[in-house]
Amino acid sequence: MLRDSDPPERQIEKLQRINEALVGRLERIQEQRGPSYALTRTAAVLEREVMARNRDLEAALTDLARTNTELARARESADEANRAKSRFLRAASHDLLQPLSAARLFLSHLAELSPMPDQQALLSHLTETIESAEELIRALSDIARLDSRNFAMNPGPVAIGRLFRRLIIDMQPQAAARGIDLRFVASAVTVESDPVYLRQIAQNLIGNALKYTSGRRVLVGLRRDGDHVWLEVLDEGPGIALRDQERIFNEFERLSRSQQAGHGLGLSIVQRACQQLGHRLELRSEPGRGSCFRVALPVMRRIEGAVPPGAQALPVRATIPLAGRRVLVIENDDAMRRAFSFLLNGWGMEVSATSEIATARRFARAQAPDVVLSDYRLDDGETGFQALDLLEADLGHSLPALIVSAETAEFIHAEAGNRPVEVLTKPVAEHELRRGLAFAIQNHIRQGGSG
């Protein structure tokens, strides 16, 4: 402690000691505070870095949210465009098939009236051209339906024996025209699938084999493999190289140089239908050794007497003559109605034709028809099934009937319910119409109706 009585030297000495003590204390404080201070500075720097990175992350998340919103809008626009495309194709297919179907029936009637060979050749070329256009329109409609968001399959038991009998009816004319021996291996197996689309899958695979094979035989049959079977279509064609076996299923893809008409859409439809049904689709082929297209189908316990929806068990041939029988035609399209009348009159049938249900009921009360041929969609929202119900109520008994429409086969069969009617989808060939009418009458007789 400094005292006033201390001499100056003493005071200076004390001050030096005090200064040294203070300096020592400051150094000790600084040493103690050093690590903590450095940590505080480091924490401050890191905090600033974290805040900066958070701002960058928030900006990135905002950009991502904006991008996701734009993608969602783009996806919705694409989905809406796809739905619009499907609606357009379905509507356009219906409207385009009407005049084409009428033209085809007119050509069939004209062919019956034209004995000259050169005229027959010209009519044959015209018919082939119309058939090619019909095939393209129907294929595009099938693709649009299979790609539709609202598309739904109706799986159930399918008796392969019945399926093969229908395929014989469908495909033998094409095989005979090409001079190909089309053979089916009989089977009593029942599988689970959509009966309408399984038939279409088989038709496309067989049709593809008939068009492009360079051999003289096509074989269709089943091969067992555990709890499922393979539906196989084998041909003696040129075969398909491994590098081409994937793109053969693309739309409008044709590898063959065959002169047969085709648009390269059949296998694309098969692939889409198999994907919708959950059926595995395989191709086994080597150049020069033919091809085997096959579809895996789950096996079901055989149900005796069960008839799957949309796949009635019909005989291969109908023996009922049509000449002299009365047919009531209900068709709201003028061209189709005239085409039906010309063709049916040419077969010797007595034809009454109208576009209205009320007029059809007057015709039927005046003279009951032997068979009814009706379009499904009539004017004012009425349908062929409604017309048939009213006609049968007026007459007090059932009538053999054939419903013809540009609607899909599965839709018409679903609408038919338990009605024992035949269904044909437009475009209708002459032999299909003749067979359909004969089947309708024959089945009606078998079920106890009058012939």
Image (spheres, rainbow, N blue to C red):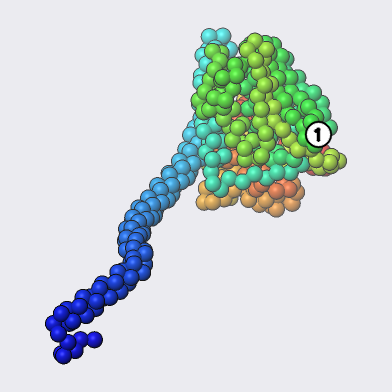
Rendered image quadrant of residue 81: top left
Secondary structure of residue under mark 1: loop
Q: Nearer the viewer, residue 302 or 136?
A: 302
Locate residue 410, reporting x and y percent: 64, 42
Q: Residues within 10 Å of mark 1 (few under 14, many from 20)?
A: few
Q: Is residue 256 left or right of residue 162?
A: left
Where, quadrant-wise, is the N terminus in this rendering?
A: bottom left
Q: Is residue 234 left or right of residue 449?
A: left
Residue at the image position 84 percent from the left and 39 percent from the top: 302
Q: Is residue 188 left or right of residue 66?
A: right
Locate residue 409, reporting x and y percent: 63, 39
Residue at the image position 17 percent from the left and 87 percent from the top: 6
Question: Is residue 338 shown above or below 20?
Answer: above
Locate residue 190, reporting x and y percent: 80, 37
Where, quadrant-wise, is the C terminus in this rendering?
A: top right
Q: Residue furthest right?
A: 304
Q: Is residue 15 visible?
A: no
Read off the residue under disc 1.
226
Tell me the kind of residue under disc 1: Gly
Rendered image quadrant of residue 173: top right
Locate residue 271, reporting x and y percent: 60, 32
Q: Is residue 287 visible?
A: yes
Residue at the image position 20 percent from the left and 78 percent from the top: 13
- Marks counted in the figure total 1
Question: Is residue 249 shown above or below 64?
Answer: above
Question: Is residue 97 shown above or below 110?
Answer: below
